[in-house]
Image (cartoon, grey):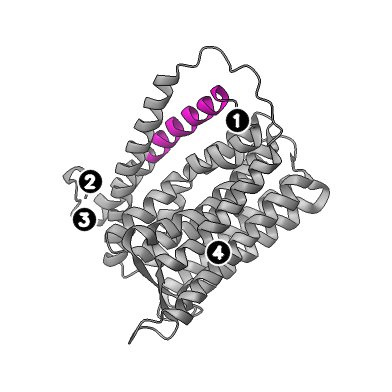
Amino acid sequence: MVLGLSPSSPLGHVLLILLASGAVWVGSDWLESSAEHLSAHYGLPAVVQGSIVVAVGSSFPELASVVVAALGGSFDLGVGAVVGSAIFNILVVPGVAGLATDDALDANRTLVYKEAQFYMVAVAALIVTFAFAVIYEPIPEGPPLGGSITRELAVVPLCLYGLYLFIQWQDVSDHEAGEPPAGIAVGREWLTLAAGLAVILIAVEALVGSVEALSVTFSVPSFLAGVTILAAATSLPDTLVSVRAARSGKAVTSLGNVLGSNTFDLLVAVPLGVLIVGAAPVDLAVAVPMLAVLTLATVLLFTVLRTDLSLSGGESWALIGAYGLFVAWVVAETVGATNTIPGV
């Protein structure tokens, strides 16, 4: 446990989770603020700032959770955090951002037909990667739908993210940067960015340890613990970024951050964990139901964004209500009231 802190009781772990979640929020705020200032200083286009720089910055907690969990031998916990965070981002973050403003959140055709659709491709790519692991790298004497994600397979989604970056670059290749804003202390901003990264890494290490301990104490599968507790904690930065952008009248940035963050989480965070540890097991029987929920959530968001190219108050409540149903289903699976996920 980080800094030698290892609570001996469930209440201690809960308190540490709350403390670490606050630290994640603080570190992410430093990271995003410095990244935004540096982007402005170096003249990066707004679309790159929103869908890549800010999105990657707000996704760093999810990336750190996968890496920390993978190094600790709990890859399922990290993957669960990424998938759960993606569901949280798709349903809760736009819903809260929509309710935080008096008017509807306006989208545009670029957001709906490029960002949203590419994100749907990212979901499909992760499912295909998991399926390849089961087909080509089955685990001997493992679960029937168990497989091992190797470094070679992890390259597939990473290449797709490379295509995403290439498309963004082509779209802004004719961008002419204006004069950088005055008053930006570049050295201080780089130090703030590094400090934010360090705080997030320490806080996420504490989060992963406490969530894993609670899952053992209450006999909750690590994947489900990651999907709910760890996912919500690491999604705080995305929520705050989108709400802040929505209140500032930047609706497209608010929604684009959600899609850009999820694209990064699925195509970079999970594969990077595999590249670090060399190979990681995956049980398709457990992963597929969650990925199916993520797919349905994505379709729901795509549908409400396409209607009048805006997100109304009623649609925002519908998204939040859908997440409530998801949490209820996870709880039902955990206590054995339903049996959609084998082995849970």
Comes first in the chain, label 3 or label 4: 3
Q: CA distance from mark 1 to mark 3?
A: 48 Å
**Label 1's element?**
loop
Q: Could you tell me the amino acid type at mark 2?
A: Val
Comes first in the chain, label 2 or label 4: 2
Comes first in the chain, label 2 or label 1: 2
Q: Nearer the viewer, mark 2 or mark 4?
A: 2
* Mark 3 surroundings: few (<14), some (14-19) or many (≥20) residues within 10 A: few
Q: CA distance from mark 3 to mark 4?
A: 28 Å
Report which residue position mark 4 lands on: 326
Report which residue position mark 2 lands on: 2
Which residue appears farthest toward the top when viewing the image?
183
Residue at 63%, 39% (x, y): give it.
Answer: 254
Residues 32 and 149: in front is: 149
Q: CA distance from mark 2 to mark 1?
A: 36 Å
**Label 3's element?**
loop
Comes first in the chain, label 3 or label 2: 2
- Quadrant position of the C terminus in the picture: bottom left
Residue span colored magenta: 24-42
Report which residue position mark 3 lands on: 9
Q: How many marks?
A: 4
* Mark 4 surroundings: few (<14), some (14-19) or many (≥20) residues within 10 A: many
Q: Could you tell me the amino acid type at mark 4?
A: Phe
**Label 2's element?**
helix
Comes first in the chain, label 1 or label 3: 3
Answer with left or right where residue 27 lies relative to residue 205.
right
Answer with left or right where residue 316 lies relative to residue 3.
right
| Residue 127 at x, y percent in the picture | 55, 69
Residue 35 on the magenta span: yes
